[in-house]
Image (cartoon, grey):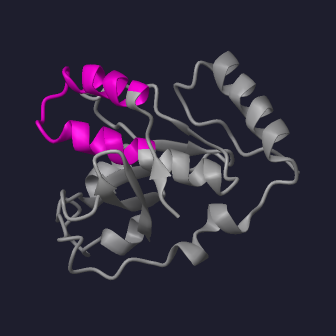
Amino acid sequence: MNAVILPRLVKKLIREARGARTPDFLEVLLAEAVARRWFLSNKVPCWRTPQHPADNGRYSLLFSNGRKAIVVPAGRRRISFDIMANARCDYLLIVKMEDTYSGYVNGFFYLFDIRKPGNIEWRPDLELLNTREMDTFPELRAEPGNFRLIYFLQSLRLLIMNDRKAPPPLKS
């Protein structure tokens, strides 16, 4: 199922990408927006990062249990274990863009899937590694009871905390 980004959001992301150091950052912001809409359409509460594109340790998405993910467009970038660990991310999500405004989450890696023993700065070619299927993604398997209520309460919690650090998991 494809997720579509509205033109108004695209304009906002274009403005946000102007402050980035890398020219491909707009592609990454669009992929992040697609991933977020894809998860929300699958009833998985998630929020985007409040960090500026140039910030070190920047993550892409935050899930309700406090886990973070970095999103990359398929075939566009390489990423290292060190970058993911610095951002304290558990997942690397690969987004397949159908066109500029739509796409879907194609697969994922755990942090340790992209590690090469003895070299934390090694950047694997993500096209050569086999991605894990989204059917096995932990956040998709843990369906919340009332999506809207959990999304509202967690959004309120993040607003109060100013979202500088990932919150601890909610106790069930």
Q: Residue at x 32, y 24 (%)?
A: 11
Placement of 168 over or under 21, stated as above or below: below
Could you tell me if residue 88 is visible in this image? no
Query: Residue 172, image x and y in percent?
Result: 88, 51
Total numbered labels: 0
Q: Position of residue 156 (x, y in %)?
A: 73, 23
Work out whether residue 142 or residue 41 is closer to the camera in this orientation and state it. 41
Tell me which residue sits at (32%, 38%) in the image.
Answer: 29
The stretch drawn in magenta includes residue 7 = no
Prevalent SS, magenta region: helix
Seen in the picture, residue 29 relative to 140 is either above or below; the reply is above
Q: Is residue 15 magenta?
A: yes
Q: Which residues are magenta?
A: 8-33
Percent of width and height locating residue 26: 23, 36
Position of 18 with respect to 16 (left or right) is left
Residue 88 x/y as whole percent: 44, 47
Q: Taking 172 as reference, is 75 left or right? A: left
Task: Indicate the quadrant where residue 75 lies.
Answer: bottom left
Q: Residue at x 53, y 72 (%)?
A: 134
Residue at the location (57% across, 50% down)?
A: 67
Quadrant in which residue 158 is drawn = top right
Res. 159 in view: yes
The answer to whether residue 3 is above or below residue 120 is above
Is residue 139 positioned above or below 157 on the image?
below
Horizontal arrangement in the rendering, residue 128 relative to residue 130 (left or right): left
